[in-house]
Image (tube, grey):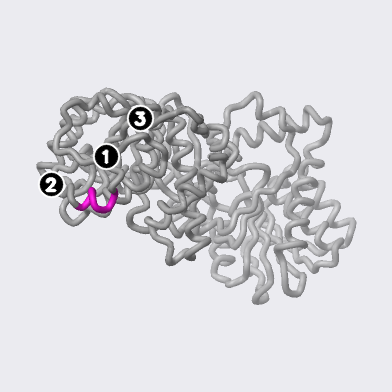
Amino acid sequence: MIALSSRQIRDWDQYTIQHEGIESLDLMERAANACVHWMTTQGIPGDHSCYIFCGKGNNGGDGLAIARLLTAKGFRTEVFIMEFGKPGTPDFQANLQRLHELGIAVHYLQEGVPLPELAAGRWIIDALLGTGLDRPPAERLATLISYLNQHDNPVCSIDLPSGMPADGSVLPPGACITATVTLSFQCFKPALLFADNASFFGKVIVLDIGLHPGYLSQTAALYEGVDRALATSIFQPRGPFTHKGHFGHALLLAGSVGKMGAAILAGSACLRSGPGLLSFLNPTGNQAILQIALPEGMCLTAPANYNIYRTVGCGPGLGTGAEAAAALKEVLNNTDRPLVLDADALNLLAIHKDWQPLIPSFSILTPHPREFDRLTGTSVSESQRWEKAQALAKRMNWVVILKGHYSLIAMPGGKAYFNTSGNASMAKGGSGDVLTGMLTGLLAHGYSPEQAALLGVYLHGRAGEIASEVYGMESAIASDTVAQIGNAFKEIGA
């Protein structure tokens, strides 16, 4: 699973046309057939009728081809073309001629002509713009988009909801179709990964339209997906003659008065992720709670030598008071191995920006959006936040995991990934603490920071999915995710 930019998608189309000896019109027919197959087998219930709204670009050509194919299957279609006074693209014109030859009625939305009345419940197919947007929709098109959004009809957008930039976020007051489902082609577009676009694209279905696979061997994906196959390729089984010394000693700087639960969650997740040993460093003297909750862990007041630990995970429940700040500064001054930094560790680094150069290269930072904004300044959109995270990872030589529905994993060398596991059951307190513990355990185990980040985010999300299957989306909690880490490992070969 990958995400490509709009330019890369256009290049892939052209590569397919050149290497398969086909016309662009043939590729449009493939896309239309894929859409109609989904619509007729899964998508359009009721009275088998729909409205199809088309622009005059190639997305509109897709819509005209869909109208022809649906009509051939017995659907009642009404086609509306947004008229701008100029001819459409050649492929649009070719599909329009095919409709005329079949006698399918086409209505032109001329300037000054009232917009059509829409019967309740009938599906709307949006083929106005697709990925062809290079500026906010103009006044008449914005008016049509607003008009369609005022109705309760289910909407199927072709490739992208009209008004959504393929590579970015919809910014107010931009007009954008609010789709029930989006049928996208071949791979994700970046826009379909951003949370601030989710209210517009609805359910996303990626349809295979047979673009030539050779193109992917000569281009780097904008984002690669982290899935089970990738996690399995990273996983390292334990050898039969190994002992605890082979799998490293992890240290967690976590917990404060009233927030020891975060330290326990992180420690539990760390232990479930394979380190040989785990010690806690808690500056507020709550060691007894940790010793009772996690007898497998050890507790320290002040390490004599930080270099005995393969990594230190910092932040869960730590607080931002003087004791916490002093403890974090002590870690930064005495550790040159990659760290895991989350929660209050990030908040302290936002307060003490001059400490950031002390963070070792290839450390893993795991901010949620608000924590990230504290570090880097407010972002106007999630797409901007992703860009800033990638720039930060390259500039500081860190691994940055920007948490979200599709968490971004930005690598120091410039590569970026989006995670495909996890669900909304994990949108609860403690989930981030679990991830911090898992990453700390994987680093201590001996995985490289890049491997730990990719494997950790996938297993964390998958454990959350399994927990929601057992307890339901509403009732699964962070400790249930911890309990399912072992089953997530088992799925990839543990």
* For residue 318, side relative to residue 399 (left or right): left
Quick check: is 346 in the magenta stretch?
A: no
Image disc number at residue 79? none
The part of the image, by quadrant, that contains residue 36 is: bottom right
Question: Is residue 391 something one can see in this rendering?
Answer: no
Q: Residue furthest front?
A: 241
Question: Of discs 3 and 1, which sits in the foreground?
Answer: 3
Around disc 2, counting alpha carbons within 10 Å, would you say few (fewer than 14), some (14 to 19), or many (20 or more)?
A: some
The residue nearer to you, when weighing 245 against 28, is 245
Counting from the top left corner in percent of width and height, residue 193 is at 51, 47
Q: Residue furthest bottom?
A: 120
Q: Amino acid at mark 3?
A: Gly
Report the number of numbered marks.
3
- The residue to which callout 2 is attached is 285
Query: What residue span does the magenta drawing correspond to?
Result: 289-294
Q: Please, is residue 423 above or below residue 209 in the view?
A: below
- Give the residue displayed 86% in from the left and 52% down from the top: 98
Q: Amino acid at mark 2?
A: Gly
- The residue to which callout 3 is attached is 248
Q: Residue furthest right?
A: 101
Say whether disc 2 or disc 1 marks the residue closer to the N-terminus. Answer: 1
